[in-house]
Amino acid sequence: MNGITAKLNRLRITGLLFGILGLAFCCVGYVFDRRPFYVSYLFALLFWISLSVGCLYCGMIHYLTSGKWGFTARRILEAGYMTLPLMALLMIPIFFGLHDLYPWARPEAVSADKILRQRAQFENPPLFIIRAVVFFGIWILIACSLRRWSLRQDSTSDPTPTIKMRTLSGPAVAIAPLTVSFAFLDWAMTVEPDWSSTIFPVIQLAGQMLIAIAFVIVILAWTRNDFPFSGFPEKPFQDLASLLVAFVLFWTYVAFSQVLLIYSANLPHEIGWYLRRIANDWIWIVGLIGLFHFFAPFLLLLFRALKQNVRALAGIALIVFGIHAVETFWVIAPTFYPRLDLHWTDFAAWFGIGGIWLAIFAANLDRHPLLARNDPRTEHLIAEAAHAK
């Protein structure tokens, strides 16, 4: 058993253990108080779905551009986006909690709110479920097709599978973000009865790309001394560091743009969304997000020495990954809690869903060769690593 296989086995077992325990505690939370359970579950589910679709975007961009940064990351990204069937299965409990989460699912709230009555033809439980099934169906179809052709290329020197991957990635790199935008409008934005924002989906897309890149950096740093990654040049890490800081800047730009436009236009419904998220103890979460989602990673990654230090880079990526989970919680929870109220199910749901996610990810990654074969660009990188030794 080589080093990576042993590490992935440990990750799979640990993830499965955390997943089973976390979801078991979630079930206990549901029995005692179902609303906090659903809030926690929605926050955790949205975060891990974001990681899955972020891996899908990054994978398709690599198939189209063939950047060197993606050669070592390719199979990690594929293992990440192949968790989408799991995410579809874990979405089912949300269908039973619509009344607890969404005001448009409560007839008394709809009858008392003019805006909800106007949206009722679009925002209602049957259409919500149908749209979720359609969204996941599109993503899973794209993901499974790309994965199948990627693995098929390993067994043949015929470039047809790679050509098919590029052909599908062209339209899919637009279709997937578009459908994800509508999905997160459904799942995250409509927890607020009257709020709307055209920039909100862009913020979500930027965050999804950001945590996917951060996750890849952490996994590559964890396995870099093991075959087949040992001896590879450091250039992919430097490229990934540049992508990380680029998406830190992009996420900050669009997030600040939303704040600026809402406050400058003095829009009462939209301002209320922010007032709830800066009230009372929530202001401390805003400070943490500002510090660790932008200022700290941006300033640290300006130093070339830190970008070239794999351990330091992985630490920064881990911080970005963790603080984005906090940001996702901040998007959802203040709608239900006027003060910062951490419920134990928040941790149980995040570790429960995350543990199962990581177990499936590790199984996907370990099932097939960690480097794509019969791709001349990959073979060139392997030759570079051999020459460096």
Image (cartoon, rainbow, N blue to C red):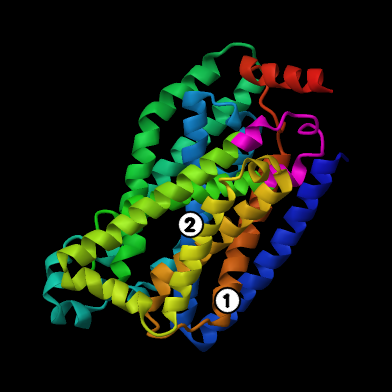
Q: Earlier in the sequence, mark 1 or mark 2?
A: 1
Image coordinates for residue 93, horizontal then vertical, percent: 46, 68
Compared across the picture, whether 378 is left or right of 325 comes to right
Picture quadrant where residue 10 is located: bottom right
Q: To which residue does mark 1 refer?
A: 26
Q: Residues within 10 Å of mark 1 (few under 14, many from 20)?
A: many
Picture quadrant where residue 72 is located: top right
The amino acid on which the numbered mark 1 sits, given as a three-letter code, is Cys
Which residue is outermost to the top?
158
Q: CA distance from mark 1 to mark 2?
A: 32 Å
Q: Which residue: 42% across, 27% down?
A: 168
Considering the numbered disc 1 on the image, is that residue within a helix, a strand or a loop? helix
Image coordinates for residue 293, horizontal then vertical, percent: 50, 59
Compared across the picture, whether 239 is left or right of 370 comes to left
Q: Is residue 281 magenta?
A: no
Q: Residues within 10 Å of mark 2 (few under 14, many from 20)?
A: many
17 relative to 132, above or below: below
Please report the bounds of the magenta region as a residue range.
Answer: 219-238
Residue 294: which numbered mark, if any? 2
- Residue 215 vs residue 43, the one in the foreground: 215
Q: Nearer the viewer, mark 1 or mark 2?
A: 2
- Residue 233 vs residue 381, the one in the foreground: 233
105 relative to 281, above or below: above
Q: Which residue: 14% across, 71% down?
A: 115
Compared across the picture, whether 136 is left or right of 269 comes to right
The amino acid on which the numbered mark 2 sits, given as a three-letter code, is Phe
77 relative to 273, above or below: above
Q: Is residue 237 magenta?
A: yes
